[in-house]
Image (spheres, rainbow, N blue to C red):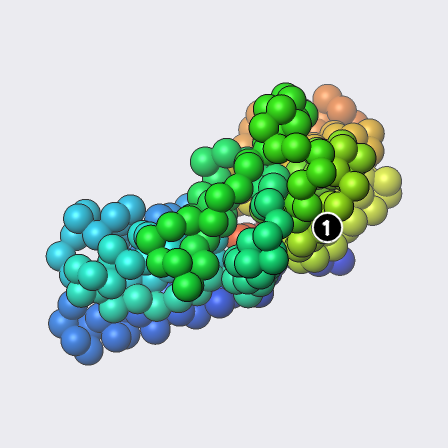
Amino acid sequence: MKVLKGKLTGYCHGVSQTLHKASSCLKTAKKKNLNCYSIGQLIHNRDVSTYFEEQGLKIIKKPEDGEPGVALIRAHGITCALRRSFEDRGFILEDATCVNIKKTQKIIVDSYRHGRTIILFGVKGHAETVCLQGTEDPSKPGKSVPMMVLSSEEDLENLFSSVDSSTPVTVVVQTTFPDEMYGKLFDAVSSHYPDCKKGNGLCYACIRRKQSAIDLASSCDAVVVVGGRNSENTKDLAKYVEKNGSTVFCIENKNDIDSSFIQTLKEKNIETIGVCSGTSTPPEVIEDVCECLKALN
Ligand code: SF4
């Protein structure tokens, strides 16, 4: 099998930072003889998360879930209220919130202070969306900045009926929000509100991975997207490959290259296959997948 690897694979800088800080949390916890936690699943990769859990990292959602110890805030970040509740209970926090998300929080606070209404495009319930919804102006602790959250075009009607068109608005977006929906929503919102400012943008690491997936889709018979099943950017990559007319396989690691996978390759006469990945996929997992595919006749 001819295998082409995408130009950009492996961890984004937010995930790299999370893993680096998870290791240092484990060291600190060991030194201080404390428990070590990640607030929410470490990254969207089961194998890596399991590895850290085996080293002693426990997953918790709220401070009541464990005895105070060292707790990692992963790349998606957490709400200001949740951060306070961990601190109040005596947890030592290590903050791995991605710089892109910190930047968005700052835009939210600055825009709010300038009297603008915040509109957030985000997948409802996604950890990053929840984190951004819980942004507080440091001068008003305990009160989240009010904002409207839009996930799809169905939410526009509610926005237009509750926020007057003369209102100055700032649009911020979950960094891994599907970009097609982002475009549609932004066009609709900016046409309705003459004073509409774009706050942040989609994550550049994801945009570049998407381009890489599209390039593979145009030069291969099929593309394998390697990444966590619950990762938004992995799901988005798969959609892009399909949209560009290529067969797509979503797998988590080489173990998913099983007999039914191989059978499908044969049925579809796949001779050249591309490999791309989400931002939480370890480089060695991608290499293993490439090697496994190359070995197929
Ligand atoms: S995908 Fe982008 S925004 Fe999310 S953690 Fe990685 S670099 Fe940060």
Q: Is mark 1 on a helix, strand or loop?
A: strand
Left or right placement of residue 264 versus residue 13 in this view: right
**Residue 185 position within the rendered picture, expressed as x and y whole percent measured from the top left:** 71, 34
- Whether residue 51 is visible: no
Q: Which residue is drawn at 16% across and 76% down?
A: 32
Q: How many marks?
A: 1
Left or right placement of residue 31 versus residue 254 in this view: left
How many residues crowd mark 1 within 10 Å: few (<14), some (14–19), many (20+)? some
- The amino acid on which the numbered mark 1 sits, given as a three-letter code, is Lys
**Residue 177 position within the rendered picture, expressed as x and y whole percent measured from the top left:** 63, 41
Left or right placement of residue 71 versus residue 265 in this view: left
Name the image quarter holding residue 36.
bottom left
Q: Establish whether ligand 1 lies closer than 8 Å to the Cβ of label 1.
A: no
The residue wearing badge 1 is 197
Task: Judge by depth and name the residue closer to the eye, 188 or 176.
Answer: 188
**Residue 166 position within the rendered picture, expressed as x and y whole percent measured from the top left:** 71, 38
**Quarter of the image that includes the C terminus:** top right
**Quarter of the image that includes the N terminus:** top right
Q: Residue at x 66, y 27 (%)?
A: 160
**Residue 266 position within the rendered picture, expressed as x and y whole percent measured from the top left:** 72, 27
Task: Judge by depth and name the residue closer to the eye, 24 or 187.
Answer: 187
Q: Which residue is drawn at 25% across and 48% down?
A: 62
